[in-house]
Image (cartoon, rainbow, N blue to C red):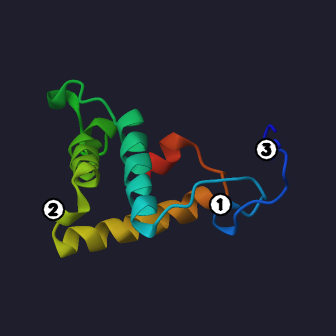
Amino acid sequence: PPLADNSSSSIKPLDTISSSGNRSMTASPSEVEEDDDQKIASLLGDHMPSTGDMMMQTQSSPGSLFPHFMSLRLLLLKPSVRRTPEENELLDILKKSFRGYTKDNKRTGAELASL
């Protein structure tokens, strides 16, 4: 006899139920950290100021932030096991701030990148 179709069953494993009741993948803390690294690196890449003419830029112009955006982005893309403890500590602080700023969804990507 054919097997019964249980795809409509309302029973779900506890480890795959999200707070909204939908099935979701569970992630380890290190996977969440890496996901934050990727989100922030992408955000910085999307909103990185252009270098433009470096001779025409002042200290306060957006283009003067380019080296800082690039350094931070490269640090985020570096595997955490290859970072120094100081670099990991700095990025932990950055990621906590990022999570706090994104929690309320009131800031644009450009605003988040400039913070």
Q: Nearer the viewer, residue 56 or 95?
A: 95
- In terms of sequence position, does the residue under pointer 3 or pointer 2 come before the other? 3
Residue at image point 15% right, 70% down: 84
SS label for mark 1: helix
The answer to which quarter of the image holds residue 100 is bottom right
Badge 2 density bin: few <14, some 14–19, many ≥20, Cα 10 Å: few
Q: Secondary structure at mark 3?
A: loop
Whether tag 2 and tag 1 are in contact, CB under 8 A, the answer is no
Nearer to us of marks 2 and 1 is: 1
Q: Amino acid at mark 3?
A: Ser
70 relative to 36, above or below: above
Q: Quadrant of the C terminus?
A: bottom left
User: Which image quarter is the N terminus in?
Assistant: top right
Residue underneath mark 2 = 82
Disc 3 crowd rating (10 Å Cα; few below 14, some 14-19, many 20+) is: few
Judged from the image, the secondary structure of the residue bearing numbered disc 2 is: helix
What residue sits right under mark 1 in the picture? 16
Q: How many angstroms separate mark 1 from mark 3 (CA)?
A: 15 Å
- Label 1 amino acid? Thr
Specify whether 55 is left or right of 76.
left
> What amino acid is at disc 2?
Arg
Q: Earlier in the sequence, mark 2 or mark 1?
A: 1
Residue located 49% across and 41% down the image: 110
Measure the alpha-carbon separation of dots 2 and 1.
Answer: 32 Å
* Percent position of residue 52, x then y: 24, 25
Left/right placement of residue 82 relative to residue 10 reads left
Name the foreground residue: 16 vs 107: 16
Query: What residue did someone put label 3 on?
Result: 7
Dot 1, how many residues are within 10 Å of its Cα: few (below 14), some (14-19), or many (20+)?
A: few
Residue 90 is tagged as none
